[in-house]
Image (cartoon, rainbow, N blue to C red):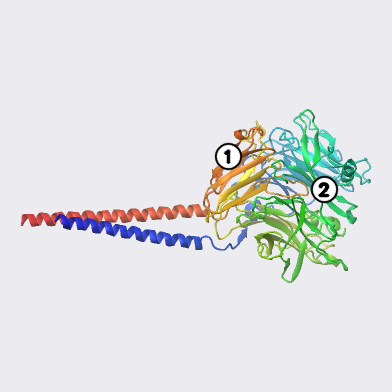
């Protein structure tokens, strides 16, 4: 009997083992199907969510800047009306409509009787209280010089009163940057040498803001310390900034200390002979309020023997995902860019500057629907008969960057114009195009990657004047904001404009990390005394992780390094890390000569770094906010289902074994009675 009873136990154990082995085989097959089906080849799709964004207030609305003005960790939008006479603050909300008008500030200066138009706006802390303020650049009709006003923030909105103690005039739109490391924004631009604004002679200048009751920045000349032959430096410094300006504040040599990068030109605007990239180290002397500059090397000539007449805004991107930050500059060889006039053949593309070497980036064909497309023409090259609203966003070539598909490689978005549109009374045809970062297999490729235009993604939007990235739901997915004309527009026929929002809805799931580096300046009026949204200029953000195959993956990005010509850059950095569910091994922040690393970062999280005190990296704090992805939820559901199945099998086998034991005991008792 004991032998028979033991046999039943062995049989039950064997049966359980078979079930468990079968379960693991099925699990292995399921994992394989998950890898094949849950992570297919990316297919982009989406929907128009304009009504959810702004409700019915979408007509004649022109966004010009992003910022978090009430420190709620949601991105607000600064916009202007069609006549560009006022600043409109739209605060973000978690429920539709996601953006609601909070404040409208009309421009008020000493020229109240003159017509003023808003040229651009840049958020930042200009008063030193840790709160987000807004610098507004304006131009009086008929004048070349620009004027500056500053609207102060109060942690919930903007105060519609100019905080400037006196009017600041300059010749170029300023670069907003913290030059002296006090976490208060400063300005770099040019000013006219004489008060005669018909005189085009300019000189570089800086404005240093301090924490004072009256907002009156100190104005200094742009002083360059000796380092090369004085005659050479005098020649270099005699060149004016490019018009429009193309400047940045970013670490270009990999030493973790940001440099000031200025593009200058030789010759007049319509007869540019050459463009030069000047790179300066910023020298801060604690005993002086002023800062000085020093050349890092001989200025780099952008064009050799080829003619270049138009150079756009700089991008600094690690587009190969190899830990190298490269400067990208869009250019056109003729003033009309993509439009063919006479026998002039335009050449356009992107110049890549790295390690003082200039290379042409290979672009895929920009022909689509039997039409040739090119960069949107700068406004100064357009005939005066064209309406200015059509060209409000066209004062320079502006590319905007974002990892649209979260594959770890940054993509670009731009407005392209059909060749010949707008000429001889014809309709102006412009489209929003996403340039996808894809591998380059052509032997002529100077880099492993290139940008391939995707016309189909946003083809539903015609007559586009602005296309920029945005994260509508703060969920790490990059969406698109668009301003378009909703009727035909010709040089003699006005057009009406509307705002549109396109929500990215990919049919696959990828992971990301979203990073924002604050100034770290104390903010007594901020919620929890943390200045959320008040971004630092020029820090380098990088990460390291491992792919599913075990290979090392690394990338870096620069934050808030440009401000002129309405760049509309995202006020955060989103790194796509693909389908890897692993922890991000390290996240590193470099600010000037200081750096700090955090380890084991959870994917799909938003990290807000507070570098205070800036010279004590060990004291820096990182706030982490999680955004669960579909893959995480699916994995949890699968594991829960597996646990339930295993539990049911074990319980069933246990019940069966108990019944068999009871039956054996009854049978044994019956035999004993017999």
Q: Quadrant of residue 274?
A: bottom right
| Residue at screen point 38% across, 58% down | 24
Residue corresponding to mark 1: 623
Quadrant in which the C terminus appears: bottom left
Of tags 1 and 2, the one toward the viewer is 2
Q: Residues within 10 Å of mark 1 (few under 14, many from 20)?
A: few
- Residue extending furthest toward the bottom: 370
Would residue 251 appear left or right of 581 to someone viewing this image?
right
- Residue extending furthest toward the front: 229
Residue corresponding to mark 2: 299
Q: Secondary structure at mark 2?
A: loop
Q: Which mark is residue 538?
A: none
In the image, residue 419 sits, relative to residue 60, either above or below, namely below
Would residue 473 appear left or right of 304 to someone viewing this image?
left
In the image, residue 540 sits, relative to residue 165, either above or below, namely below
Where residue 99 appears, x then y in whole percent? 65, 48
* Mark found first going from the N terminus, 1 or 2: 2
Where residue 551 appears, x then y in whole percent? 56, 54
Q: Nearer the viewer, residue 462 or 470?
A: 470
Where residue 163 appears, x then y in whole percent? 78, 35
Q: Nearer the viewer, residue 50 or 165?
A: 165
Would residue 227 appear left or right of 606 to someone viewing this image?
right
Distance CA(mark 1)–CA(mark 2): 41 Å
Quadrant in which the N terminus appears: bottom left
Q: Quadrant of residue 222?
A: top right
From where the camera sits, is residue 321 visible? yes
Q: Nearer the viewer, residue 365 or 142?
A: 365
Q: Secondary structure at mark 1?
A: strand
Q: How many marks?
A: 2
Where residue 455 appears, x then y in whole percent? 69, 64
């Amino acid at each position: 009997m004991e032998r028979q009873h033991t046999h039943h136990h062995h049989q039950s154990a064997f049966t359980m083992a078979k079930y468990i082995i079968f379960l693991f085989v099925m699990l292995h097959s399921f994992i394989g199907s998950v890898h094949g089906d849950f992570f297919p080849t990316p297919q982009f799709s989406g929907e128009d969510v304009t009504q959810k964004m702004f409700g019915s207030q979408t007509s004649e609305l022109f966004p010009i800047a992003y910022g978090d003005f009430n420190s709620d960790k949601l991105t607000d939008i600064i916009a202007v009306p069609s006549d560009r006479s006022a600043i409109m603050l739209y605060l973000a909300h978690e429920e539709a409509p996601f953006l609601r008008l909070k404040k409208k500030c009309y421009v008020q200066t000493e020229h109240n009787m003159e017509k003023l138009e808003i040229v651009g706006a840049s958020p930042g802390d200009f008063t030193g209280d840790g709160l987000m303020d807004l610098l507004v650049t304006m131009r009086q009709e008929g004048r070349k010089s620009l004027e500056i006003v500053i609207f102060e923030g109060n942690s919930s909105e903007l105060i519609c009163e100019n905080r400037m103690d006196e009017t600041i005039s300059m010749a170029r739109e300023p670069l907003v940057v913290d030059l002296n490391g006090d976490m208060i924004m400063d300005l770099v631009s040019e000013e006219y040498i004489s008060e005669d604004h018909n005189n085009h002679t300019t000189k570089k200048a800086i404005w240093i803001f301090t924490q004072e009751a009256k907002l009156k920045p100190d104005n200094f000349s742009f002083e360059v310390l000796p380092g090369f032959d004085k005659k050479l430096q005098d020649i270099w410094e005699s060149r004016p900034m490019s018009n429009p300006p193309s400047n940045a504040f970013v670490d270009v040599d990999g030493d973790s200390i940001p440099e000031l990068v200025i593009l200058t030109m030789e010759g007049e605007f319509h007869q540019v002979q050459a463009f030069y990239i000047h790179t300066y180290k910023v020298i801060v002397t604690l005993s002086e309020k002023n800062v000085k500059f020093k050349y890092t090397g001989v200025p780099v000539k952008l064009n050799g023997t080829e003619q270049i007449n138009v150079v756009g805004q700089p991008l600094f991107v690690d587009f190969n995902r190899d830990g190298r930050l490269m400067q990208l500059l869009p250019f056109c060889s003729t003033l009309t860019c993509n439009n063919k006039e006479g026998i002039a053949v335009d050449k356009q593309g992107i110049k890549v500057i790295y390690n003082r070497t200039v290379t042409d980036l290979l672009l895929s064909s920009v022909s689509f629907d039997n039409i040739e497309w090119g960069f949107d023409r700068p406004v100064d090259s357009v005939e005066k008969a064209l309406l200015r609203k059509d060209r409000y966003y066209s004062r320079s070539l502006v590319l905007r960057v974002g990892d649209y598909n979260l594959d770890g490689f940054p993509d670009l978005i731009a407005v392209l114009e059909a060749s010949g549109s707008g000429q001889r009374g014809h309709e102006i045809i412009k489209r929003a195009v996403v340039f996808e970062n894809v591998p380059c297999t052509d032997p002529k490729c100077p880099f492993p990657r290139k940008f391939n235009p995707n016309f189909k993604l946003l083809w539903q939007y015609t007559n586009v004047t602005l296309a920029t990235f945005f994260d509508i739901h703060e969920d790490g997915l990059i969406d698109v904001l668009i301003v378009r004309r909703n009727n035909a527009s010709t040089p003699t026929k006005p057009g009406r404009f509307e705002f549109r929002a396109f929500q990215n809805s990919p049919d696959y799931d990828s992971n990301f990390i979203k990073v924002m580096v604050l100034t770290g300046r104390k903010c007594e009026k901020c919620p929890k005394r943390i200045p959320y949204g008040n971004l630092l200029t020029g820090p380098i953000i990088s990460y390291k992780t491992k792919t599913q195959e075990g290979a090392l993956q690394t990338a870096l990005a620069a934050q808030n390094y440009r401000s002129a010509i309405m760049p509309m850059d995202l006020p955060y950095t989103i790194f796509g890390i693909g389908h890897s569910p692993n922890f991000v091994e390290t996240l590193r922040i470099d600010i000037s000569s200081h750096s700090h690393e955090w380890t084991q970062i959870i994917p799909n999280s938003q990290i807000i770094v507070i570098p205070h005190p800036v010279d004590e990296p060990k004291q820096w704090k990182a706030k982490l906010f999680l955004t669960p992805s579909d893959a995480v939820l699916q994995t949890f559901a699968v594991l829960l289902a597996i646990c339930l199945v295993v539990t049911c099998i074990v319980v069933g086998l246990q019940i069966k074994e108990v019944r068999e034991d009871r039956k054996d005991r009854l049978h044994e008792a019956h035999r004993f009675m017999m």
